[in-house]
């Protein structure tokens, strides 16, 4: 999940034409948090996901694209087929 969230964040940030520092400023979080998230060091809480999405002008679901819990098998599924992917801001 860490790598998937990181990839989604980087993809959305690059599409928004923002530097990590700009994203941190707009989301009102520390620059080190953005760097750690992009390095897949930790998963953010809901508030931080919403702040990041707002700063990127995307739906929070875009940052969580490709991640889901497979209840039947009791594990996370990180790689959905490409047709299920959300593109940052594109529905």
Image (cartoon, helix red, strand yellow):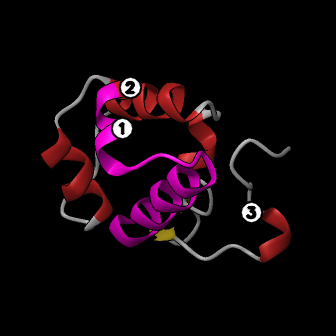
Task: Tell which of 56 and 66 is nearer to you.
Answer: 56
Determine whether label 2 and label 1 are within 8 Å by CB: yes
Task: Tell which of 55 and 63 is nearer to you.
Answer: 55
Mark 1 — residue? Answer: 22
Q: Residue at x 28, y 51 (%)?
A: 43
Determine whether label 3 and label 2 are within 8 Å by CB: no
Residue 59 is one of the magenta-drawn residues:
no
Mark 3 — residue? Answer: 85
Mark 2 — residue? Answer: 26
- Marks 2 and 1 sit apart, C-alpha to C-alpha, by 6 Å
From this view, report whether residue 29 is shown above or below residue 19: above
Image coordinates of residue 14 in percent, x first then y, are 54, 57
Image quadrant where one finds the C terminus: top right
Residue 74 appearing in the image:
no
**75 horizontally vs 88: left or right:** left
Image coordinates of residue 65 in percent, x first then y, are 62, 55
Image coordinates of residue 5 in percent, x first then y, are 43, 59
Crowding at label 2, few (<14), some or many (≥20) Cα neighbours within 10 Å? some
Q: Residue at x 69, y 73 (%)?
A: 80
Q: Main secondary structure of the magenta part?
A: helix
Element on which disc 3 rests: loop
Q: Residue at x 41, y 25 (%)?
A: 51
- Marks 3 and 1 sit apart, C-alpha to C-alpha, by 26 Å
Residue 8 is one of the magenta-drawn residues:
yes
What span is in magenta? 1-25
Task: Tell which of 77 and 25 is nearer to you.
Answer: 25
Q: Residue at x 29, y 35 (%)?
A: 24
Crowding at label 3, few (<14), some or many (≥20) Cα neighbours within 10 Å? some
From this view, report whether residue 79 is shown above or below residue 16: below
Element on which disc 2 rests: helix
């Amino acid at each position: 999940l860490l790598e998937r969230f990181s990839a989604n964040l980087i993809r959305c940030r690059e599409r928004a034409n923002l530097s990590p520092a700009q994203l941190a400023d707009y989301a009102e979080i520390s620059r080190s948090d953005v760097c750690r998230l992009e390095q897949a060091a930790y998963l953010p809480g809901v508030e931080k996901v919403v702040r990041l999405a707002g700063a990127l002008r995307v739906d929070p679901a875009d940052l969580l694209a490709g991640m889901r819990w497979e209840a039947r098998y009791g594990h996370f599924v990180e790689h959905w087929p490409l047709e299920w992917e959300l593109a940052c801001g594109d529905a």
